[in-house]
Image (tube, rainbow, N blue to C red):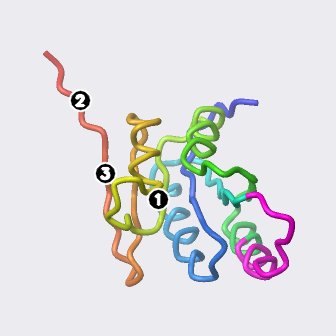
Amino acid sequence: MKSEKPSVLACVTSQYECDRIIKTAKHIADDCDCELRVLSVLHPTNNYTNISDQIEYLYIVAKESGADMTVLFNSNPAEAVSEFVKENNVQRIVTGMHDGKDNSFLVKFNQLSPLTSISMISKDNNVYSLDLCRCYS
């Protein structure tokens, strides 16, 4: 089901320190009058016990920020996030920093969803944004 109101999507992994991504995405969403959503894409496996505490913690942080949190199980995170973006009227994703690799999540995501703005949060909470700029003739 598609959402009518634009949203900002915090993309988190199963790490406690991803709380900074949710908190920063909350500020961005508030500034642009958007809904906040949180998404974690986990690689399919038979055992998630080693990350269950982290996911529970991020779920609590999401709820405290007024957001829902979705967990998807997919071996292709960029594709899963791109589909989620299309289905939920996401205007911007907020992630951790790009790792510099040509096959990273952010490179693949940008290829699949080139019109979606991206904000990256460094470990010291600096925000770096890539915004779509259009030239009109």
Q: Mark 3 points at which residue?
A: 130
User: Which numbered dot is residue 109?
Assistant: none
Image quadrant where residue 133 sits: top left
User: Which numbered dot is residue 134?
Assistant: 2
* Image x and y of residue 87, in percent: 65, 33
* Image x and y of residue 73, in percent: 75, 53
In the rendered structure, does residue 85 fall within the stretch colored magenta? no
* Image x and y of residue 107, in percent: 38, 49
Q: Which of marks 1 and 2 is nearer the N terminus?
A: 1
C-alpha separation, residue under disc 1 versus residue under disc 3: 14 Å
Q: Name the residue under label 1.
A: 28
Point 17% across, 26% down: residue? 135
C-alpha separation, residue under disc 3 versus residue under disc 2: 13 Å
Callout 1 crowding tier (Cα within 10 Å): few <14, some 14–19, many ≥20: many
Q: Element at badge 2?
A: loop
Determine whether 51 is above or below 12 in the image.
below
* Image x and y of residue 17, in percent: 57, 82
Left or right: 116 as drawn, with respect to 101:
right
Nearer the camera: disc 1 or disc 2:
2
Callout 2 crowding tier (Cα within 10 Å): few <14, some 14–19, many ≥20: few
Q: In which quadrant of the rendered image does the N terminus lie?
A: top right
Q: Earlier in the sequence, mark 1 or mark 3?
A: 1
Which stretch is magenta? 44-58
